Image: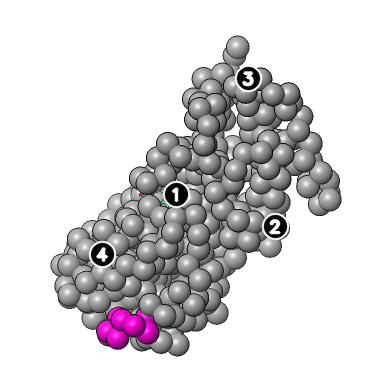
Amino acid sequence: MLFNQQFLYTPGPTPIPERVQYAMNKPMIGHRSQEFPILLEQAATRLQPVFGSDNPVTIISGSGTAALETAAANVLEENDDVVVIVTGAFGDRFASICEAFGANVHRLDIEWGKTCSPDQLQSFLKQLDKNIKAVIATYCETSTGVLNPVHELGKVTKELTDALFIVDGVSCIGAVEADMPGWNIDILAAGSQKALMLPPGLAFLACSDQARKVIQNNKTKRFYLDLNRYFSSYDNEKSTPFTPAVSLINGTIEVCAMIEEEGLDQVIKRHDLLKNMLREGLKALELPLLTSDETASPTITAVRTPTEETKKLKKLLLDKYGLSIAGGQKKLKGEIIRIGHMGYSTPYSMLQVLNAIEMATQQLTGNNVLGKATAKAEEVWIQHV
Ligand SMILES: *Cc1c(COP(=O)(O)O)cnc(C)c1O
């Protein structure tokens, strides 16, 4: 069997559109040239609607975790009290980063596979009775596939505290709604290799004016990730303090053009459709979904693998169908598989992944399921054509 293509369904990295590949192949330019400030300003301002930000988006070379560390390093000082809502492995990572900076981390641990409700945050903040510097939430928790109700969590945060509300949006920004002022978000972090259809390598941060003030007054030692350097370089010369990843910034501009052409509203609707197609298809195969329909993220879907046969799915999909999906992380290792459907993903992508899953399921179980999942997904799609 010839596969000249790897079919990438991991929740990051994700497939790159051809036109973005081309944009990234443009000849190199010097970042102290006359052209570079124009490019950086394009990327920083055209990303604003995607982040729902009033301010230009800061671009740092690094993976998504660099965005999280940047937020922590620039906001937290030693012994600051910080609340981290942990709904899975990435909330857990953010808590570890805060601990590394010497903060007193108050973890609001939620059962994995569930979202944090506004009531849960409200009672947690009420019983804490501390001067909280920041409340941190994960928008899409990639390890379980839930989408936390960050608009409600931001509201509760501001009603009960003077804290900054910091959101990890790495695995959904570019595919979901975001409204920083409306939802009381002070820092929204993202990465290039998820819903933003780029290779790994860029960390994005959008900051509110209140966040900028806190960052300015923060005494924590930092250098490369010091946001004040990025703000002043951008404000004064539309540049970056250190050599930027120029090719990835060219790619970012092309991604912005694609989102503008499709329309952000349509991009968001498309991801909702992808989620619904995939979930209905998987239900038809009687594969148990980890998350409820109400809390499911439009960018990633997790399925339990309770039987010997389902545990073999991931390897069979890769070996025989050329299709990569992800397994579980930490406490869900060996318990689930995860399918990414964000960014450069279309209804055909969902038919492709369901097609491979139903064939692999039939091979593994001997049950006749060919066409069952894809038919259900087509029924969902046809209502939107
Ligand atoms: C992917 C991801 C990150 C960052 O991971 P990197 O490997 O550093 O890019 C952070 N948070 C969430 C929710 C993610 O999905």
- Asked whether 21 falls inside the magenta stretch, the response is no
Taking the image as shown, residue 229 lies to the left or right of residue 143, namely left
Q: Residues within 10 Å of mark 2 (few under 14, many from 20)?
A: some
The answer for how far apart the CA atoms under marks 2 and 4 are is 35 Å
For residue 296, say whether it is visible: yes
The percent position of residue 268, horizontal first and vertical second, equals 65, 58
The answer for how far apart the CA atoms under marks 3 and 1 are is 27 Å
The answer for how far apart the CA atoms under marks 3 and 2 are is 34 Å
The image's mark for residue 363 is: 3
- Please report whichever mark, 3 or 2, sits nearer to the chain's N-terminal start: 2
What residue is rendered at 60% in x and 56% in y? 292
- Please report whichever mark, 1 or 4, sits nearer to the chain's N-terminal start: 4
- Amino acid carrying label 4: it is Cys
- Amino acid carrying label 1: it is Ser
- Please report whichever mark, 3 or 1, sits nearer to the chain's N-terminal start: 1
Residue 287 against residue 273 in the figure, above or below: above
Of 122 and 58, the residue lying toward us: 122
Q: State yes or no: discs 1 and 4 in contact (Cβ < 8 Å).
A: no
The answer for how far apart the CA atoms under marks 2 and 1 are is 23 Å
The answer for how far apart the CA atoms under marks 4 and 3 are is 46 Å
Q: Nearer the viewer, mark 3 or mark 2?
A: 3
Per the image, the residue denoted by label 2 is 269
Taking the image as shown, residue 343 lies to the left or right of residue 376, namely left
Highlighted magenta segment, given as a residue range? 125-132
The image's mark for residue 98 is: 4
Per the image, the residue denoted by label 1 is 143
